[in-house]
Amino acid sequence: NRLGVATSSYDFDDFESGKCIPHIVASAPDCTIGFNIMLPEDSPLSQYNIPHYAPLCDSATYYPELRLTNHMLASFMDQDSYGFYKRLGVENIFFLPHAISEKYLVQKPQKRDLDVVMAGSFVNPDAIRKVWDEQLSPKSRDAMLEIAERVLASPHVSHLQAFTEEVEEHGPFEKELLAKKLDFFSQLNMLEVYIRNVDRLRLIQSIEGHTVHIFSANVFKQAWKKALGDKKNIAFHDEVSFDELAAIFARAKCVVNSIPTIKRGLHERLLLALGQGASVLGNENIFIAGQFAPSKALLNMLSPDYSQANDLLQDAFANEEARFADVVATHQTIKELHTWNVRAKTLANTLPVFLTRMKG
């Protein structure tokens, strides 16, 4: 609205039930928008030539229907997802990184009573390995595990790239998936979940000498407890909303941002943590490295050297004034490049080009 773009908002339940469809059609918008919301080809909106734009915040391979529709426009939070779908011949897509509201950029120091905070889900990677044991031959299962380790150890090789390269060798791995009629997208999704959770587990297991506060839903909390066993420096908390998370991060010296499958993009958790004055412990990533200068704000590491986390934390925590100053120094970059105001301007320039082409 601040850019002069007229908008209306609807409850998704009303959209799913069709209750608001007549009003949308009558208002004849240039497009509809819904985060992570995909519309089928036979959606009522497509019948009226109203395109739909989906800003996608989850793993790209959760949305294979993008290959099959012409009335959808989507953006990806990382460049590898964009490139993956481009290779599949999908045209109506673009790169749009995560962002935060400028209101979350806090400049004043405050008391921080939480050493390290981890907020997020957890699926025991052993469960994924069990599925692969059942579905794949030992050789193909080992190929998946080798792909995972390659991705974990690289700041630039994504799981999409590594899996695609394995398939494009047209060897036993691809032949087995085809012979068993195993869906490639499903295997990619399991690979992404496996890599993400192996990284989270190894990272948390490696931290010693500092209390790690894990905020997670009960179902994930039980999985965390089982995987971490009797590790002593863990404190569990209930899941909190995004707005509540900001207050938690404002109490933290460091926030864990495990994004091992995102190599050319970033996550809103990183931006929110920096905005609230916390350092961020996470994976080396060539996109992030190009956005922020090395400092005590971003504590980046790579597999297999997870023990490096302790040295990074110790160095950052040794001087709280210097640590906080480094974090606040990132706010100018966030303000200039990674707020929703910036993203809105990008969309105001980008969407008309796509929508004109889609409407013919």
Image (cartoon, rainbow, N blue to C red):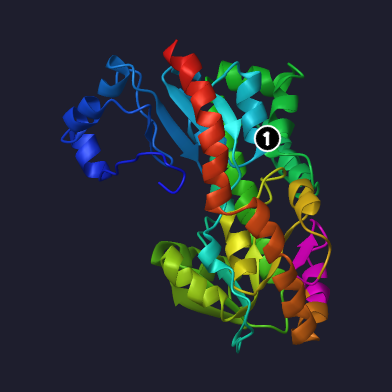
Q: Say left or right for 86 vs 300.
A: left
Disc tally is 1
Q: Which residues make up the magenta segment?
A: 296-312
Considering the image in quadrants, where does the C terminus appear?
top left
Q: Secondary structure at mark 1?
A: helix
Q: Residue at x 19, y 35 (%)?
A: 20
Q: From the viewer's perspective, is 185 left or right of 202?
A: left
Q: Amino acid at mark 1?
A: Asp
Residue 219 in the image, given as x and y percentages of width and height: 41, 62
Q: Which residue is depicted at the point 72% across and 79% down?
A: 324
Is residue 144 in view from this perspective?
yes
Q: Is residue 147 above or below residue 333?
A: above
One can see residue 134 in this view: no
Q: Nearer the viewer, residue 23 or 181?
A: 23
Estimate the x, y position of residue 198 in percent, counting from the top left.
65, 55
Task: Answer whether residue 303 is magenta in the image.
Answer: yes
Q: Give the residue pinned by disc 1.
A: 80
Answer above or below: position of 163 versus 356: below
Q: Quadrant of residue 26?
A: top left
Q: Position of residue 150 (x, y in %)?
A: 78, 43
Q: Is residue 359 above or below residue 165?
A: above
| In the foreground, 274 or 259 | 274
Between 349 and 157, the one lying in front of the other is 349
